[in-house]
């Protein structure tokens, strides 16, 4: 079971991020899906068969363990191993760009990103190997595996999918690029839409401006209040943003600017279940 991934340093304003964003807008991305699903149009919205999350709705983030949603919740995000919450809008969490520590051995060795010495590149915060999406061929192979998880989300009755670690390229020691990340997520977007699932952009505010080219429908933003990023997500996704804050100050900032527009919840960093000593859930 994954634990919560706290947003890292907000580097959206860096020159490198802006250069990557400009390149993406000007040049598009490569790669193609491994199945027969149609590619997303560069500027098209999601297919009409895809249901988007309601705007400014009660939200709960349960990827650390499913439990009965509190009163007033209309949208819930849960791990792909869990089942959807009956009667609500359900988002399915998948770790798409990195391997869970327990699943490292299930990935082909050549699909784990390696440095010049052949050592696997690890996200040290979470002890997760980065997946190698640096070529079109490898993107297709990684996507084939992740798309099976997306199929499982659809079969269970989820409404949307949340692929985590879109920003893994920022931890790749310059071995991966923003273009690689966007090309890969386009494969997942095409597959999700073919399975009648909406697909979220998880964090990675520096790429919010190319979300239509990436085929992304809404955002799941951690700590956008704490890092003053909620406005960028709100603009890019027309207020269709699910916000998770991990501090009371972050919650206050998110609510003060966007409490009447976005879906905002304060959770504990481990996204614990009720009854745990770590459990926190607040909306004000």
Image (cartoon, rainbow, N blue to C red):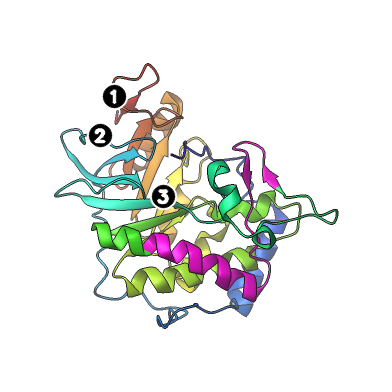
- The residue wearing badge 2 is 67
Tell me the magenta residue range. 122-150
Residue placed furthest toward the top: 277
CA–CA distance in space, label 1 to label 2:
8 Å
Q: Is residue 216 visible?
A: yes
Q: Position of residue 38 (x, y in %)?
A: 41, 83
Badge 3 marks a residue whose secondary structure is strand
**Magenta stretch encompasses residue 231:** no
Q: Quadrant of the N terminus?
A: top left
Q: Which mark is residue 220?
A: 3
Quarter where residue 273 is shown: top left
Identified at 34% across, 60% down, the residue is 152
Q: Earlier in the sequence, mark 1 or mark 3?
A: 3
Q: Residue at x 45, y 38 (%)?
A: 225
Q: Identify the mark nearer the N-term, 1 or 2.
A: 2
Q: Which residue is mark 1?
A: 274
Is disc 2 placed on a helix, strand or loop?
Answer: loop
134 sits to left or right of 199: right
């Amino acid at each position: 079971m994954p634990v919560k991934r706290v947003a890292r340093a907000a580097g959206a304003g860096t020159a490198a991020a802006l250069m990557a964003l400009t390149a993406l807008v000007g040049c598009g991305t490569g790669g193609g899906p491994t199945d027969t699903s149609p590619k997303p149009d560069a500027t098209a919205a999601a297919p009409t068969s895809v249901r988007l999350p309601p705007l400014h709705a009660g939200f709960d983030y349960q990827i650390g363990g499913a439990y009965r949603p509190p009163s007033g919740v209309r949208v819930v995000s849960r791990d792909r191993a869990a089942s959807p919450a009956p009667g609500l809008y359900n988002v399915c969490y998948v770790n798409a760009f990195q391997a869970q520590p327990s699943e490292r051995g299930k990935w082909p060795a050549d699909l784990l990103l390696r440095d010049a010495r052949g050592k696997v590149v690890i996200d040290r915060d979470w002890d997760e190997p980065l997946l190698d999406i640096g070529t079109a061929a490898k993107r297709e192979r990684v996507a084939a595996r992740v798309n099976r998880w997306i199929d499982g989300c659809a079969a269970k009755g989820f409404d949307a999918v949340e692929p985590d670690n879109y920003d893994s390229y920022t931890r790749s020691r310059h071995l991966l690029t923003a273009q690689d990340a966007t090309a890969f997520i386009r494969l997942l977007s095409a597959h999700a839409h073919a399975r009648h699932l909406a697909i979220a952009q998880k964090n990675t505010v520096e790429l919010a401006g190319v979300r239509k080219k990436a085929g992304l429908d809404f955002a799941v933003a951690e700590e956008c209040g704490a890092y003053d990023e909620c406005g960028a997500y709100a603009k890019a996704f027309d207020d269709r943003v699910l916000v998770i804050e991990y501090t009371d100050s972050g919650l206050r900032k998110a609510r003060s600017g966007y409490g009447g527009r976005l879906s905002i919840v304060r959770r504990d960093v481990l996204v614990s279940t009720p009854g745990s000593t770590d459990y926190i859930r607040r909306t004000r």
